[in-house]
Amino acid sequence: FHNVVGALAHEFNNVLLGVRGHSARLREILPPDSSEYGLVSQLDNASRHMNTLVDGLLMLVRGRVEPFREPIDCCAVTAEVVRSIRSELPSSIALAYNCLNTPYFVMMEEAHFDYVLRTLIRHARDNIQSQEETRPGRIVVRLRLIDEHIHIVVMDDGPIQSASALEKCFEPL
């Protein structure tokens, strides 16, 4: 079993390496403000997330359960996510971003931070679009430092959710 999982993980990582190589090349030739550039960034982030999943699978097979952690700058990663996710938002939804004045590093897997932030922004988008009438909306992403902890806040001006929907907000991603 361990050998099969190891071989599959190796094959997945080879494919993902190719995807990341091609996305890096595309970012070199595409204008940074193009929608295609944002899509390439999403592809690269998805491949990084898949790498994280494969690594997690390998850790389970090998008996290790501690995730890979590295110092990441939350402000820089958030700025990249906000920039690249704009292509997923309709033009009627404004996306604002407020960050800390200085870089703030935390120890965690960058792909996981990226995934959580994208998921929160997509939920905000879906909340705005759930309204009966079509109207402009606004999503605000804010990073704040409170007592040595970084707080990530994603707000939208969509309708107030039902009590059951609000309960789901606090389920771990």
Image: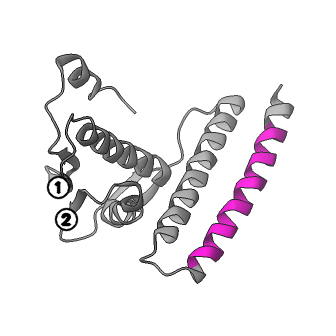
Q: Position of residue 118 (x, y in %)?
A: 39, 48
In magenta segment, residue 116: no
In contact (CB < 8 Å): disc 2 and disc 1: yes
Density class for disc 1 (Cα within 10 Å; few <14, some 14-19, many ≥20) is few
- Write the residue at 49% across / 51% down: 111
Q: Is residue 36 left or right of residue 20?
A: left
Tell me where residue 87 sits by quadrant.
Answer: bottom left
Front in this rendered view, residue 169 or 132: 132
Magenta stretch, residue numbers: 6-27
In magenta segment, residue 18: yes
Q: Quadrant of the N terminus?
A: top right
- Write the residue at 56% across / 75% down: 27
Mark before the other along the chain sequence, 2 or 1: 2
Q: Is residue 100 left or right of residue 105?
A: left
Q: Main secondary structure of the magenta part?
A: helix
Q: Give the residue at mark 2.
A: 100
Q: Is residue 2 left or right of residue 36?
A: right
Q: Quadrant of the C terminus?
A: top left
Q: Secondary structure at mark 1?
A: strand
Q: Give the residue at mark 1.
A: 145
Cα distance in 3D space between marks 2 and 1: 7 Å
The residue under label 2 is which amino acid type? Leu
Front in this rendered view, residue 99 or 57: 99
Q: Position of residue 30 (x, y in %)?
A: 55, 79
The residue under label 1 is which amino acid type? Leu
- Write the residue at 44% across / 46% down: 115
- Write the residue at 46% across / 75% down: 34
Q: Position of residue 88 (x, y in %)?
A: 41, 55
